[in-house]
Image (spheres, helix red, strand yellow):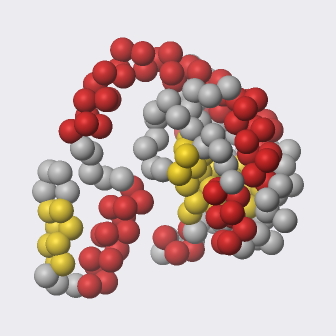
Amino acid sequence: YEILIGRVGSVVTRDQHLHHKLYRMHATQGISVSGDDTAQIQRSLAHMSLRYEQQSQSTLRLLDWLKQQPQFIQVLHPTLSDSAGHQFWKEVCTTGKSAGLASVIFDSRYDMHAVRRFCDNLKLFKLGFSWGGPVSLVMLYDLKQMRALENTHLQQGLLVRFCIGLEDPADLIQDIQNALKQLE
């Protein structure tokens, strides 16, 4: 039996393939939450709207810059009119504010090694899945390895997801710009 234990329960299977799929989902989705994380979330609720406002503004500023970079063949964010979820975002998010998650797809001339080097050279962005905190994070995804269904709205290439924190957006742009220099 393969056992995957979470905070609220567990999943048990004899099927190795199913276990691997569940394990990957658990790892990439960050499904379990620790007691410490829960306490931090509770403490942060009082100033959530201030953080959301700042992260929204910073993300929009960053998006303008990301769209101009030739290394990225696609920039994904619901506020962008060419993003697949834009119409739904307009209907649901009537305030015009948006979350601090933005993704880019690197031009296919950059392989996994190069994009990992890019992520490793970021100084302000930390590697991690914990979206929504005050620190900017980055995570690399190889969607071909993660998804069985074809994403027809996505360009071919490696996807990097940014979670924008509370750092100055000019500093975040400079950090990405410096890391992009390491691609070549």
Work out which quarter of the rendered image holds the N terminus and state it: bottom left
Across and down, in percent, residue 58 comes to: 66, 28
Across and down, in percent, residue 139 comes to: 55, 54
Say whether residue 125 is left or right of residue 177: left
The image quarter containing residue 156 is bottom right
**Vertical order, 104 against 172 (above or below):** below
User: Going 27% across and 45% down the picture, which residue do you hit?
Assistant: 33
Across and down, in percent, residue 52 comes to: 51, 23
User: Going 59% across and 21% down the picture, which residue do you hit?
Assistant: 54
Visible in this render: residue 87?
Answer: no
User: Going 79% across and 62% down the picture, which residue do you hit?
Assistant: 183
**Vertical order, 16 against 130 (above or below):** below
Q: How many marks?
A: 0
Say whether residue 54 is left or right of residue 71: left
User: Going 56% across and 63% down the picture, which residue do you hit?
Assistant: 141
Across and down, in percent, residue 3 comes to: 17, 72
